[in-house]
Image (spheres, helix red, strand yellow):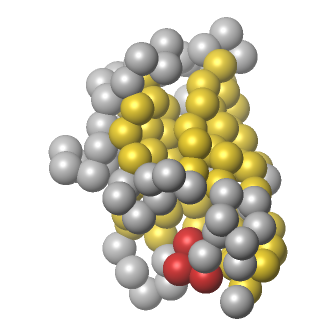
């Protein structure tokens, strides 16, 4: 199983960025994103079920980030708008066999992260 994320980079506050992740090896009921800022614990960002029927967002990104999924391509994207310096973090693509959120622990599968840096 491999989760390969891409799309990170350096942007200015207020800009947009789109992260993409492709999974190989198997399909998952739920996919999503966590992030880890320097010196902080990993933080849930968003997750989505295989058919897009259920979505979860952290309060800190709700209204600014949009998650989407293509089950046939086994991909999950995260459109990040109105980025803030506090969004600076390594973003991890994640997956599991059930939907996950900020309240029920960490998902089973993790990819290597992609760095997002938002300058003020």
Q: Residue at x 75, y 57 (%)?
A: 17
Tell me: 109 left or right of 92.
left
Vertical order, 50 against 106 (above or below): above
Q: Residue 15 in the image: x percent, y percent?
A: 77, 67
Along the line of sight, the residue nearer the viewer: 60 or 115: 60
Vertical order, 31 against 106 (above or below): above
Q: Residue at x 27, y 52 (%)?
A: 102
From this viewpoint, is residue 88 visible? Answer: no
Q: Exactly how many numbered labels are in the figure?
A: 0
Q: Residue 44 in the image: x percent, y percent?
A: 38, 55
Q: Residue 26 in the image: x percent, y percent?
A: 55, 17
Tell me: 12 left or right of 70.
right
Q: Residue at x 65, y 55 (%)?
A: 80
From this viewpoint, is residue 38 visible? Answer: yes
Q: Residue at x 61, y 76 (%)?
A: 84
Tell me: 66 left or right of 18.
left
Along the line of sight, the residue nearer the viewer: 110 or 73: 73
Along the line of sight, the residue nearer the viewer: 109 or 41: 41
Q: Residue 114 in the image: x percent, y percent?
A: 68, 60
Which of the image's four quarters has the C terminus? bottom right
Vertical order, 10 against 114 (above or below): below
Which of the image's four quarters has the N terminus? top right
Choose top left, top right, bottom left or bottom right for residue 21: top right
Vertical order, 54 against 116 (above or below): above
Choose top left, top right, bottom left or bottom right for residue 117: bottom right
């Amino acid at each position: 199983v491999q989760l390969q994320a891409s799309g990170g980079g350096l942007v200015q506050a207020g800009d947009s960025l789109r992260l993409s992740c492709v999974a190989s090896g198997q399909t998952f009921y739920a996919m999503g994103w966590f992030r880890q800022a320097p010196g902080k614990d990993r933080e849930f960002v968003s997750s989505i079920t295989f058919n897009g029927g259920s979505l979860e967002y952290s309060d800190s990104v709700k209204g600014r980030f949009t998650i989407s999924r293509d089950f046939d391509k086994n991909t999950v994207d995260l459109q990040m708008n109105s980025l803030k310096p506090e969004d600076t973090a390594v973003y991890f693509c994640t997956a599991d066999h059930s939907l996950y959120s900020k309240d029920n622990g960490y998902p089973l599968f993790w990819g290597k992260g992609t760095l997002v840096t938002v300058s003020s």
